[in-house]
Amino acid sequence: MEASNSKGSCWTCLSQDISCDSALPHCKNCESNHKKCTGYGVRLQWGPVYGITRTNSPQYKNSRTSRTSRMQNTRHTPLYGSLSTFSLLPVDNRLLQHFLRHISTIALAIDYTENGYRMLTPMALEEPALLNAILAVAAAHLSKWQQVEDTESHKYLRRALVQLQEVLGDPESAVKESTLGTILFLASYEVFNGTNKWKQHFKAVGGWLKLKSDTTNLSSFLKTWICMIDTQAALNIGQCSIPEVEEWLNTEAEQRNNQHAIDPLLGCSRKLPKLMAIISQLEAGRIYRLSKSENSDQLEVQCDIRKKGEALKTKICSAVMDFQSSPTLSVSCGRDGLIATTPSYQTQPDFIRRICAAAEIFRYALLVYVYRVVNGYRAILDMETQFAVDEVYRLLPFVPDAIGPGANLGWALVVVGSETDSPELRQYIRCRWHGLKILELNNNESGEILTEEVWRRRDSLQYEDHLSWQDVMQDIGSEQILV
């Protein structure tokens, strides 16, 4: 249940029963008194049936009888057990609530009732390493939202790393799903903060899978999370690094053939992650074969690559979304029939239009990507690929903000933005990047920097040859996940 706050005061002023000016982002009264404003967000508490109330609620503060009774009834329990909803210290509880209410939503393209991030919470309350990895992500993100210095996240990060090391020392605990979840959250911490350290953690994911050996019963959400990172990394910086990903995607493709299913993590057709993996292999194979072949053989190699590229484009075209029908949700490595959570401020038709438009933007961007893999970056776009670029610009207004499916369009903005010379359209892309900043995820900032550098090089006489945006990414030392 929600803790009572009918006055709209910040929680610091409310707890001290003093007036509050309700200013944003922090109350001026707290600032003038050099106190930390704890904000206005909803706070939850257990109902009376559990015998637990918040120690800083107004009702609790104003009742000396209740206070005396509570001290007597909880004398035998640890202090932290009476402080918050999840039997956590208040600061930890606040961060976990931030994770549940905000991060678990913006980390997905489409929120759904069985949101995999939220489903990990019960496991986290039993596994300290996983909990501290989640709290590290939440602390770093919350500090960005509040525009204050991040002084907390590294504390949780260190705890998570130490506890993870202990867990890995126990063969039975090492192969638990909570251990894999911890590693993935550590990777997400680095992705959200815009560093390249995520690669170290993701390499550990591969090690965990080898240690686990049999992944048949592994959570479909965790599988899809791994697939999302691996396929995106492959499109950006090279070939897929997790061998199991191809096996998982092939197995699911054989079992399901729902054309209008959308993956809620990526926000694209459930058919596309498998094609992304194949495209990355084609790109890596093209570079290798052309580097090893003689000049006389390169034409034959290029013809073979073009043939494979046309086959891939046909499959991508088959993943088109029908705006007139309601798409279902299905994680790429899991079951169909997930139920989307429609935001209260959107009508159902508007919500469907948004998620279909976002899925189509992703699909058209992938068509552009395949064209560049096959033809290189010197080639002028053919009519079909130019149409794909134009369609992206036509569909972007259907996803007008960074909420929901709009949060995962960073990769598409880089791909299509790299093909754009019009000053007006470039300014529009800049506006979209600016809109994504509200999420406070630094990988979006990396995407914006990359796009601007691509444009600078396209416009500069020093760069007569058009470099791919992947080459530019490596030149500037960025190896970020753009979704």
Image (cartoon, helix red, strand yellow):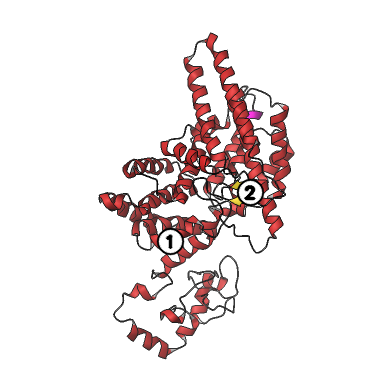
Determine crowd level at label 2: few under 14, some 14-19, many 20+ residues with C-alpha closer than 10 A: some
- Can the viewer see residue 142? yes
Q: Which of marks 2 and 1 is in front?
A: 1
Question: Label 2, on which residue?
Answer: 434
Please name whichever residue, 418 or 403, is drawn nearer the observer in this view of the structure.
Answer: 403
Q: Is 458 one of the magenta-colored residues?
A: yes
Residue 178 place in picture, x, y as percent: 37, 54
Please name whichever residue, 135 or 257, is drawn nearer the observer in this view of the structure.
Answer: 257
Q: Is residue 402 toward the left or the right of residue 238 in the image?
A: right
Q: Which amino acid does label 2 sit on?
A: His
Question: Magenta stretch: dominant SS?
Answer: helix
Please name whichever residue, 261 or 76, is drawn nearer the observer in this view of the structure.
Answer: 261
Q: Is mark 2 on a helix, strand or loop?
A: helix
Q: Would you place residue 304 above or below residue 422 in this image?
A: above
Q: Which quadrant of the rendered structure holds the C terminus?
A: top right
Residue 141 place in picture, x, y as percent: 49, 56
Say which quarter of the image contains residue 413.
top right
Which segment is the magenta one? Answer: 456-460
Q: Is residue 7 toward the left or the right of residue 171 in the image?
A: right
Q: Are marks 2 and 1 in contact (CB under 8 Å)?
A: no
Question: Label 1, on which residue?
Answer: 121
Q: What residue type is labelled 1?
A: Thr
Please name whichever residue, 241 or 172, is drawn nearer the observer in this view of the structure.
Answer: 172
Give the alpha-carbon distance from disc 2 to disc 1, as whole Å.
32 Å
